[in-house]
Image (spheres, rainbow, N blue to C red):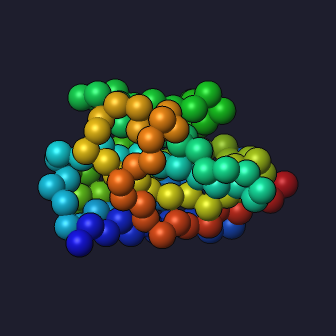
Amino acid sequence: EVKLVESGGGSVQAGESLRLSCTATGLPFGEFAFGWFRQAPGKEREGIACMAGTDDVFYKEFVKGRFTLSTDNARDTIYLQMNNLQPEDTAVYFCVADRLNWGLCSGAYAPDHWGQGTQVTVSS
């Protein structure tokens, strides 16, 4: 059974940072693409940072320069470093995984595997 378990969410002030972690079990880590989606109150889920191709990462424009996706293959874990958080970043953040390594954040298809989500709340 595939499991994606997120951690690291919480409540912070605007301008502060958080690092989300997602540990994957039940799948061959190196054969999957991973990414992060979020769902803000009253809005649809959207992909914000996703692995793309062999070594590239796609970022939604509004997180570029502030968020960084990274992986630790030895720990089967991916991270989302989030800096300079703003109130509009308040959302539930989900880790996702799929065998396809293109278009993971595009919305063209729903990733096969999702974590349970972790809440991030940013106050001004």
Q: Where is residue 97 in the image (x, y as percent from the top left)?
A: 34, 51
Q: Quadrant of the C terminus?
A: bottom right
Image-quadrant location for residue 120: bottom right
Does residue 38 appear left or right of residue 76 in this picture?
Answer: right
Residue nearer the viewer, 9 or 27: 27
Q: Where is residue 38 in the image (x, y as percent from the top left)?
A: 59, 52
Residue at the extreme right: 124
Residue 79 seen from this side: no
Residue nearer the viewer, 113 or 15: 113
Residue nearer the viewer, 82 or 102: 102
**Residue at x 61% of width, y 28% of height:** 61
Does residue 58 appear left or right of residue 90 in this picture?
Answer: left
Image-quadrant location for residue 91: bottom right
**Residue at x 17% of width, y 45% of height:** 31
Q: Where is residue 98 in the image (x, y as percent from the top left)?
A: 31, 48
Q: Position of residue 80 (x, y in %)?
A: 46, 49
Does residue 103 appear left or right of residue 76 in this picture?
Answer: right
Residue 75 seen from this side: yes
Image-quadrant location for residue 93: bottom right
Q: In which quarter of the image is the N terminus?
A: bottom left
Does residue 82 appear left or right of residue 40 in this picture?
Answer: left
Is residue 107 placed above or below 34 in the rendered structure?
above
